[in-house]
Image (spheres, grey):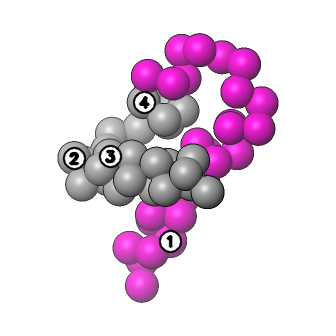
Amino acid sequence: MSITSERERVVAPPIQSCDDDNTPDTTVFRSVPQHWTLTPQQRAFIDAFADEVSQK
Protein backbone atom coordinates (compact mmCIF):
# COMPACT_ATOMS: atom_id res chain seq x y z
CA MET A 1 0.00 0.00 0.00
CA SER A 2 1.61 3.24 -1.11
CA ILE A 3 0.09 5.32 1.71
CA THR A 4 2.20 3.51 4.31
CA SER A 5 5.48 4.07 2.45
CA GLU A 6 4.49 7.69 1.89
CA ARG A 7 3.94 8.19 5.61
CA GLU A 8 7.22 6.49 6.46
CA ARG A 9 9.04 8.76 4.02
CA VAL A 10 7.37 11.84 5.51
CA VAL A 11 8.00 10.83 9.13
CA ALA A 12 11.59 9.60 8.77
CA PRO A 13 13.46 12.97 8.53
CA PRO A 14 12.20 14.41 11.85
CA ILE A 15 13.21 11.23 13.69
CA GLN A 16 16.72 11.28 12.24
CA SER A 17 17.25 14.98 12.94
CA CYS A 18 16.31 14.60 16.61
CA ASP A 19 19.72 13.06 17.30
CA ASP A 20 21.69 16.14 16.28
CA ASP A 21 19.08 18.80 16.91
CA ASN A 22 21.33 21.86 17.10
CA THR A 23 19.39 23.99 14.63
CA PRO A 24 16.58 25.93 16.34
CA ASP A 25 14.86 26.92 13.09
CA THR A 26 13.93 23.31 12.33
CA THR A 27 11.65 23.15 15.37
CA VAL A 28 9.15 25.45 13.64
CA PHE A 29 7.56 22.43 11.99
CA ARG A 30 9.05 19.13 13.13
CA SER A 31 12.23 19.43 11.03
CA VAL A 32 10.39 18.86 7.75
CA PRO A 33 12.12 20.41 4.72
CA GLN A 34 10.47 23.67 3.71
CA HIS A 35 10.14 22.68 0.04
CA TRP A 36 7.79 19.83 0.95
CA THR A 37 4.13 20.57 0.36
CA LEU A 38 2.14 18.61 2.91
CA THR A 39 -1.60 18.29 3.27
CA PRO A 40 -3.17 19.16 6.63
CA GLN A 41 -3.67 15.43 7.20
CA GLN A 42 0.04 14.78 6.66
CA ARG A 43 0.99 17.60 9.02
CA ALA A 44 -1.38 16.24 11.67
CA PHE A 45 0.07 12.76 11.24
CA ILE A 46 3.63 14.03 11.66
CA ASP A 47 2.68 16.09 14.72
CA ALA A 48 0.87 13.15 16.32
CA PHE A 49 3.71 10.76 15.55
CA ALA A 50 6.37 13.15 16.85
CA ASP A 51 4.39 13.73 20.05
CA GLU A 52 4.02 9.98 20.54
CA VAL A 53 7.74 9.39 20.02
CA SER A 54 8.76 12.20 22.36
CA GLN A 55 6.61 10.73 25.16
CA LYS A 56 8.42 7.36 25.06
Q: CA distance from mark 1 to mark 3?
A: 16 Å
Residue at 70 percent of width and 27 percent of height = 21
Q: Is residue 46 visible?
A: no
* Amino acid marked by disc 2: Pro
Residue at 22 percent of width and 47 percent of height = 40
Q: Which mark is residue 30?
A: none
Disc 4 packing (10 Å; few <14; some 14–19; many ≥20)? few
Q: Which residues are magenta?
A: 1-28
Left or right: 32 with respect to 12?
left
Q: Which mark is residue 5?
A: 1
- Of helix, strand and loop, which one carries label 3? helix
* Amino acid marked by disc 4: Phe
Residue 45 screen position, x and y as percent: 35, 56
* Amino acid marked by disc 1: Ser
> Mark 3 or mark 4, which has the lower sequence index?
4
Disc 1 packing (10 Å; few <14; some 14–19; many ≥20)? few
Q: Which residue is mark 2?
A: 40
Residue at 24 percent of width and 54 percent of height = 41
Contact, mark 3 vs mark 4 (Cβ under 8 Å):
yes
Q: Which mark is residue 43?
A: 3
Left or right: 31 with respect to 3?
right
> Mark 4 or mark 1, which has the lower sequence index?
1
Residue 43 screen position, x and y as percent: 32, 46
Please tell me whether residue 12 is drawn above or below residue 24 in the rendered image: below
Q: Which mark is residue 29?
A: 4
> Mark 2 or mark 4, which has the lower sequence index?
4
Q: CA distance from mark 2 to mark 4?
A: 12 Å
Q: CA distance from mark 4 to mark 1?
A: 21 Å
